[in-house]
């Protein structure tokens, strides 16, 4: 018999060191795709102190100003204070880029006139998840955590809370009943960088009286347990205080630990990499299962072999909320999981990836795998 339980998820702001690295990587990816839609890009970024290292493999006819793209991205995040070790104008850039390995390139690009027959860029398993517990079909804990961190950034950039600084994170705990339905938000933990002049009492008052009412809406309750900067002041932050690396926030990027993850990161990778395109398409498939009324919760796993177009397997789990066999048959009828077909269906050879980097890759309006579906 099902019992009540609690689930927690975390989100981070765009100023978190790992997200700084992700945003730089996706900014470079978009710059390459803007000039060369067929570019093969796999970029990793490391940021620490006054240093930014851009490394990886790029095969393209495009010529971009890497330094300009990197510095613009850092400035957009908000690291512009020249007194900090890490800032847009003063960062020391190291570039370590080579071409894609010929063996991988040959495996992905078959000798065929049909682009939909391109092979997968790597082996691996990708997961997509959807649940009817929120309008955007995301688990409530990660949805609300993103709402908080996004609001923190908006208040900082809009001047509503000028004492905030770019680096922050939030954690939200939700209570579920025995039918797996969210019934209450029980705990919120927020750690946010701030100026030295603001007191912890002032910061806590801002969170409780201004931030949370806007971010949580109907889920704000008087009995909510709120922790703000529980370790004390948080003045030093971002890459000046901590190292950031691309791909270390894969749970933040997806479903907050609710639903499985294949382990592959998204940022800095062009759509020939199924770590990215396969996960996006699996999300679309899971959304469609829920929107079609075949299940209230759905998790889609798709697995690939490098160089092969057809997936090794496609599996649907409905967690007892629907018929998995019926859902699987539905996806086989309506979805083509070949990497080339995914790229064509979602039009992924476009510079659309900077908008995905922060506050989750799912549940956002306007991105192809989240668009309204005809008939559902």
Image: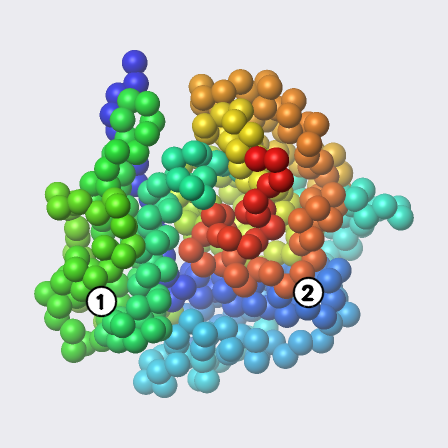
Residue 34 in the image: state x and y as whole percent: 68, 68
Q: Which of 222 and 324 is in front in this view?
A: 222
Which of labels 2 and 1 is toward the front? 2
Give the residue at mark 2.
Answer: 33
- The crowding category of the residue bearing disc 1, from other C-alpha atoms within 10 Å (few below 14, some 14 to 19, many at least 20), is some
User: What is the residue that sits farthest to the top in this orientation?
Assistant: 1
Element class at badge 2 = helix
Report the number of discs. 2
Q: In this view, does 223 lie above or below 162?
A: above
**Which quadrant of the rendered structure holds the N terminus?**
top left
Q: Nearer the viewer, residue 92 or 146?
A: 146
Left or right placement of residue 220 versus residue 40 in this view: left
**Image quarter for residue 308?**
top right
Residue 291 in the image: state x and y as whole percent: 53, 33
Q: Which residue is painted at 61% across and 56% down in the image?
A: 269
**Which quadrant of the rendered structure holds the C terminus?**
top right
- The crowding category of the residue bearing disc 2, from other C-alpha atoms within 10 Å (few below 14, some 14 to 19, many at least 20), is many
Q: Which residue is painted at 21% across and 62% down in the image?
A: 210
Residue 240 visible, this angle:
no
User: What is the residue that sits farthest to the left in this orientation?
Assistant: 201
Residue 126 in the image: state x and y as whole percent: 57, 38
Q: Nearer the viewer, residue 291 or 159?
A: 291
Q: Which mark is residue 234?
A: 1
Residue 179 in the image: state x and y as whole percent: 32, 23
Left or right placement of residue 112 versus residue 231 in this view: right
Q: Which residue is painted at 16% across and 74% down in the image?
A: 198
Element class at badge 1 = loop
């Amino acid at each position: 018999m099902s019992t009540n339980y609690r689930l927690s998820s975390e989100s981070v702001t765009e100023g978190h060191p790992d997200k700084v690295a992700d945003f730089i990587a996706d900014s470079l990816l978009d710059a390459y795709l803007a000039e060369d839609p067929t570019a093969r890009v796999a970029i990793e970024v490391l940021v620490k102190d006054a240093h930014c290292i851009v490394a990886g493999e790029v095969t393209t006819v495009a010529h971009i100003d890497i330094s300009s793209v990197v510095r613009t991205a850092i400035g957009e995040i908000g690291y512009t204070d020249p007194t900090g070790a890490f800032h847009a104008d003063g960062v020391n850039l190291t570039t370590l880029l080579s071409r894609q390995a010929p063996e991988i390139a040959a495996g992905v690009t078959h000798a065929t006139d049909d682009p939909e027959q391109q092979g997968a860029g790597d082996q691996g398993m990708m997961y997509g998840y959807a649940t009817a517990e929120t309008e955007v079909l995301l688990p409530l804990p990660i949805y609300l955590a993103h709402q908080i961190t996004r609001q923190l950034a908006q208040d900082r950039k809009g001047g509503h809370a000028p004492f905030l600084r770019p680096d922050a994170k939030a954690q939200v705990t939700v209570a579920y009943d025995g039918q797996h339905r969210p019934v209450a938000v029980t705990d919120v933990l927020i750690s946010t960088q701030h100026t030295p002049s603001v007191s912890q009492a002032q910061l806590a008052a801002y969170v409780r009286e201004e931030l949370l009412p806007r971010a949580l809406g109907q889920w704000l309750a008087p009995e909510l347990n709120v922790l703000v900067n529980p370790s004390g002041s948080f003045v030093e932050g971002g890459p000046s205080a901590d190292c950031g690396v691309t791909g270390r926030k894969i749970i933040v990027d997806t479903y907050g630990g609710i639903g499985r993850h294949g382990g592959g990161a998204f940022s800095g990778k062009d759509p020939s990499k199924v770590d990215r395109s396969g996960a996006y398409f699996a999300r679309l498939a899971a959304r469609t299962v829920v929107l079609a009324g075949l299940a209230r919760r759905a998790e889609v796993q798709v697995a690939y072999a490098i160089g092969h177009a057809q997936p090794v397997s496609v599996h649907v789990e409905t967690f007892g909320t629907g018929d998995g066999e019926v859902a699987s048959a539905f996806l086989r009828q309506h979805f083509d999981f070949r990497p080339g077909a995914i790229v064509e269906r979602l039009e992924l050879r476009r510079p659309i990836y900077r908008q995905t980097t922060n506050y989750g890759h799912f549940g956002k309006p306007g991105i192809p795998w989240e668009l309204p579906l005809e008939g559902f």
